[in-house]
Image (cartoon, grey):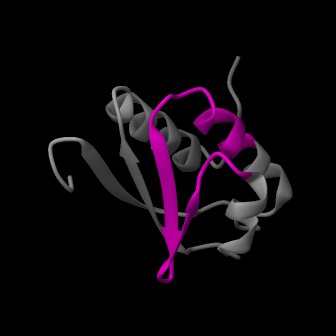
Amino acid sequence: MVDDNTLQVKVSLDNEFGLHARPAAILAKEAQKFSSDIRLSHDGKEVDAKSILDILTLAATHGSALCIKASGEDAPEAVRRIKELISRRFEVRG
């Protein structure tokens, strides 16, 4: 937790090939469902989680530590769902 309006959580990227095009697209699509500002950071670089291209610039590989940060009305749900998506190794469920 950063402040009253911003939530932050760290996760480990456990999928085999890291944040390549397919998981980046899945993550951005999920982030776009929320009105909150959602950011991802890795190795000191922070990007917009709603942008596939921004996510790819992180060059996050298997085992990387990612930080998910969100601020806005639906930030708690956004952080929870994105963390869950990463934990499931980007497996999309029904």
Residue drawn at (68%, 61%), measured in percent from left and top? 55
Name the one closer to the observer, 18 or 38.
38
Q: Quadrant of residue 47?
A: bottom right
From this view, report whether residue 30 is shown above or below residue 1: above
Residue drawn at (70%, 76%), measured in percent from left and top? 59
Q: Is residue 92 left or right of residue 74?
A: right
Give coordinates of residue 61: x percent, y percent: 67, 75
Q: Quadrant of residue 36?
A: top left
Q: Is residue 91 visible?
A: no
Residue drawn at (60%, 26%), measured in percent from left and top? 33
Q: Is residue 70 left or right of residue 18?
A: left
Give coordinates of residue 70: x percent, y percent: 39, 46
The mark total stands at 0
From this view, report whether residue 23 is shown above or below residue 60: above
Quarter holding the C terminus? top right
**Residue 45 is one of the magenta-drawn residues:** yes
User: What segment is highlighted magenta in the picture?
Assistant: 26-51
Q: Is residue 63 visible?
A: yes
Which residue in the rendered view is the most extreme toward the bottom?
43
Which residue in the rendered view is the most extreme toward the right?
21
Residue drawn at (70%, 67%), measured in percent from left and top? 18
Name the one closer to the observer, 85 or 55.
55
Which residue in the rendered view is the most extreme toward the left?
4
Give coordinates of residue 32: x percent, y percent: 63, 33
**Residue 89 is one of the magenta-drawn residues:** no
